[in-house]
Image (cartoon, coloured by chain):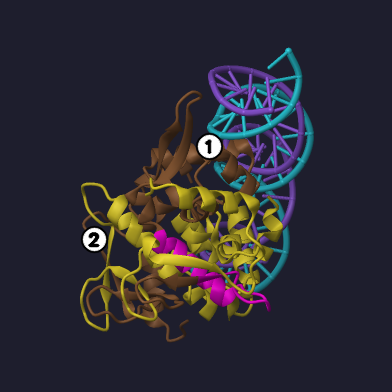
Chain colours: A brown, B yellow, C cyan, D purple
Amino acid sequence: MKWDTLEEEPCSLARTVAVIGDRWSLLILRECFLRIRRFDEFQASLGITRHLLADRLKKLVRFGVLRRIPYQESPKRYEYILTQKGLDLYPIIMSIVHWGNIHMVDSRGRPMLHEHKNCGKMFDPVMVCSECGEPLTAKAVHVHPGPGARQSSPVQAKAQERARKSFAST
Amino acid sequence: MKWDTLEEEPCSLARTVAVIGDRWSLLILRECFLRIRRFDEFQASLGITRHLLADRLKKLVRFGVLRRIPYQESPKRYEYILTQKGLDLYPIIMSIVHWGNIHMVDSRGRPMLHEHKNCGKMFDPVMVCSECGEPLTAKAVHVHPGPGARQSSPVQAKAQERARKSFAST
DNA sequence: CGATAAAGTTCTATTTTAGAACTGTCAATA
DNA sequence: TATTGACAGTTCTAAAATAGAACTTTATCG
C-alpha cells in the first residue's frame, strides 16, 4: 500500500489511520492531553528520538491536529497545542485507554483513574447510539455504503456471501 | 523505545498501542468487523504483503484478539475470528471512523453509514460518562494516578506546574 | 567568558517493510 | 494420469524507516 495516499482512501478509518496510525502519534497525543507541549518535554517523557519527534509533530501540524505557537521571542520558541480537531480525538484516546484498562491491566490495577468533573465520580467511557442512547455493540450495527463509497470489492462481496450462508459466527 | 516491552508500560494507552498501534493492525481489524476471515481475503482486500499479513495475524492471535480456527480438513485451512477481546475493540474502531467522518471527508460525503438495528436509525457514536450519562469532553475530565501507576515523571510534573500557572490554554 | 537551554538537524548502523517469487497440500478438471 | 488452481503461508533482495548519538543555532545567566 501507498501510505502517502492513505488519506484519500474511501474509508474513514483508513483516513484517520493516516493521521494517528503509527506507533508514535498516539503516544504523542496522549502527552498533549496530559498538557505536555514542548519539544524537549515530549522527547524526555516519551524517549522518542528527536528526529522522529520532529517528523511526527510536523505531520500532526500538517493535518491540523496540533498548532505550533510561539510562546516567547528571542530566541523564538514554539509549543504544540491541540486544535479543536485534535481535541476531537479525545473519544479515540479514551476508548483505547478503556480497552487497555479492561484487557491489559496487570495485578496492580489501573495506572490511571478518570474523574468526570460534571458529576464528580470516577467513570468509564461508554459508547452509545446518538439516536436512541443505547450502548453500541458490533453485532447491533449494520453497515451501508454512503455517498462517498466506491463499490464494494469482489473479495468483500464474497466474504459477505459466505457469511450469509454460514450459521457459524463470531 | 523498546517496542517489544511496550505492553508492560504503566499506561493503558501504551499497552493497547502495543496491540493495535501499527499501520496495518487497525486496517486488518476493520476487515474482521466487515466479516473478512481468510488469509487470501485479507491480502486481496488490503493489498498488504503476505509476509506482513502473516506476521500481524500471528501477533493479533498472540494477544488474544483473533482466534485461528480450522474451517476444513485436508488440506487443513484456517480462518481468523474475533474473540470477545477483539469484539471489545469496536468502540475504538467506531470512534476512529467517526472522527474520520467529521474531519476527513471530501465533498462526496461519507464512505459508509451505520444503522443501529435496535432503533433502526442511522447514527453516530457518542461517548458518554458511565456514571451520569453526559457526553465526555477532554476538559471535563480530571486524571488521577491509579493503583498501577508509577510516580509521574519529572517532565510531566513540570508541564503540570506550568499549566497551573498559565492562563493561556486550549 | 563559559555554561546552559530550547528546538531542532545531521550522521551512520540497524531494523522494518515492499514486492515478487516460491513451497506444499489437496481438489477438481481434461 | 497429468494439469491446473486454491489456499496459507515462507523466502528472497532492495528500499525505506528508525534508533542512537552528536552537532547547530540563538540567546540568556552567572
Residue A66 in percent (x, y) is at 41, 44
The circle on residue A68 is none
Q: Secondary structure at mark 2?
A: loop
Pointer 1 residue = A55
Q: Write down the chain letter for disc 2.
A: A
Q: Which residues are magenta?
A: A90-113
User: Label 2 amino acid?
Assistant: Gly
- Taking the magenta stretch, the answer to whether it contains residue A68 is no
Residue at image coords 36%, 47%: A83
User: Label 1 amino acid?
Assistant: Asp
Q: Is residue C8 above or below residue A112?
A: above
Residue at image coords 57%, 45%: A42
Q: Along the polypeptide, which appears first: circle 2 or circle 1?
A: 1
Asked where in the image residue B58 lies, by quadrant, the reply is bottom right
Q: Is residue B139 above or below residue A106?
A: above
What crowding class fits label 1: few (fewer than 14 Cα within 10 Å), some (14-19), or many (20 or more)? few
Taking the image as drawn, is residue A27 in sight?
yes
Pointer 2 residue = A146
Residue at image coords 64%, 55%: B153
Taking the image as drawn, is residue A154 in sight?
no
Residue B170 in percent (x, y) is at 37, 49
A55 on left or right of B136: right
Residue B12 in percent (x, y) is at 57, 67
Q: Secondary structure at mark 1?
A: helix
- Taking the magenta stretch, the answer to whether it contains residue A98 is yes
Q: Write down the chain letter for disc 1.
A: A
Which residue is more in the foreground, B90 or A147? B90
How far is the residue under mark 2 from the one under mark 1?
34 Å
A13 on left or right of B48: left
Residue A88 in percent (x, y) is at 35, 56
